[in-house]
Amino acid sequence: MDKKKRIFSGMQPSGELTLGNYLGALKNWIGLQDEYECMYPVMDMHAITVRQVPADLRKRSLDVLMQYIACGIDPEKSLLFFQSHVPQHAELMWVLSCNTQMGELSRMTQFKEKSQKHADNINAGLFTYPVLMAADILLYQADVVPVGNDQLQHLEITRDIAQRFNHHYGDTFTIPEAYTGKAGSRVMSLQTPENKMSKSDPNPNGFISLLDSYDDIIRKFKRAVTDSGSEIKASPDKPGVTNLLSIYCAVTGKTLKEAEEEFDGKGYGDFKLAVGETVACELKAVREKYEYLAKNKDYVEKIYKESAEIAKKIAEHTMRKVRKKVGFTAI
Ligand code: TRP
């Protein structure tokens, strides 16, 4: 049998996970677990590129890891750990930094956006963020990287860095491919459906947190904005209805056509309630599993410690090659 290809992806523990993270990323990750060897760390080192309250970061990082498991990332199949537990990420980042140009990094859209947003803290880590991301991926010789559109530019620079390194020092890194998942899994705000669903939405009714209660989820869907007219059809001039339909399809696996037929002739009220109930039922299981994990921290700790040990072995294998290639003295 052929060796399974390796998938690598992660999220920053920058806040609560939302329905957007679940339908846009986590559900993809879960579906890939049988076909690929998967690694899904929590990117805590990336998180400190912006100011954090240390105790909050620690809590959120663990929370994100527990939510990965609660959503269906299976610790028997995938590696779940914290980026900071494998020091080779930082080590490889240094070597790659010396093989990355300032010009390349200054073109990154996310850097430009984040340095505007955090104008009082434009630190060097914010600038070299993509190099750490490249190190994450290349360290494990990942073949495929599921990412959202906002991270495609970072994946592109990762490929450039890897190709250049391989060219200069000889074959060292696998060149990773992006995996952007199924179309239509981009979840928009329930209140301003022109914008992506985000936990930083000033209106808490705009987003569904994965740990929201059943009733809160129903309430938020009931209040979701719809569009003028009364037809339940996806179209560019009906962003609210389109978003609800696409959420419904992402959860149920139905096609848009099937969903439109199902709701044909129904009013917006019934439609919103039906979508709300579907989401609330799906997330109920997630919340229950999360609550179980929160009471069984020893079990969670065992998972991330064991995963980090395996990750370290893979990482060290790559680092031995890298140190030799660049001319460091063998220990
Ligand atoms: N930068 C990614 C994000 O904010 C998180 C991330 C860090 C990542 N390292 C990665 C994603 C490596 C994929 C692969 O979403």
Image: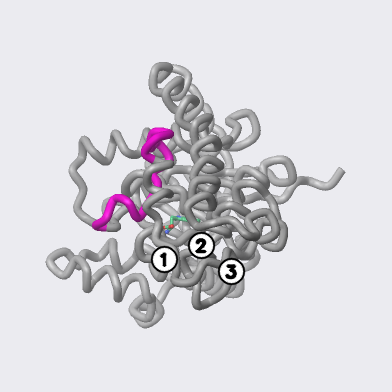
Which residue is denoted by mark 1 in the rendering? 193
Q: Is residue 56 above or below residue 7?
A: above
Q: How many marks?
A: 3
Image: magenta residue range = 202-216
Which dot, 3 or 1, sits closer to the camera?
3
Question: Residue flagged by tag 1: what amino acid is it?
Answer: Pro
Front-lying residue, 223 or 329? 223
Residue 100: x, y in percent? 42, 73
Label 3 environment density (alpha carbons within 10 Å; few <14, some 14–19, many ≥20): some
Checking the image for residue 234, the label placed there is 3
Front-lying residue, 146 or 292? 292
Q: As drawn, is 30 to the left or to the right of 322?
A: right
Label 2 environment density (alpha carbons within 10 Å; few <14, some 14–19, many ≥20): many
Ligand 1 placement by image quarter? bottom left
> Which element carries disc 1, helix, strand or loop?
loop
Q: Is the C-beta separation of discs 2 and 1 under 8 Å?
A: yes
* Marks 3/1: CA–CA distance: 13 Å
Question: Residue flagged by tag 2: what amino acid is it?
Answer: Asn
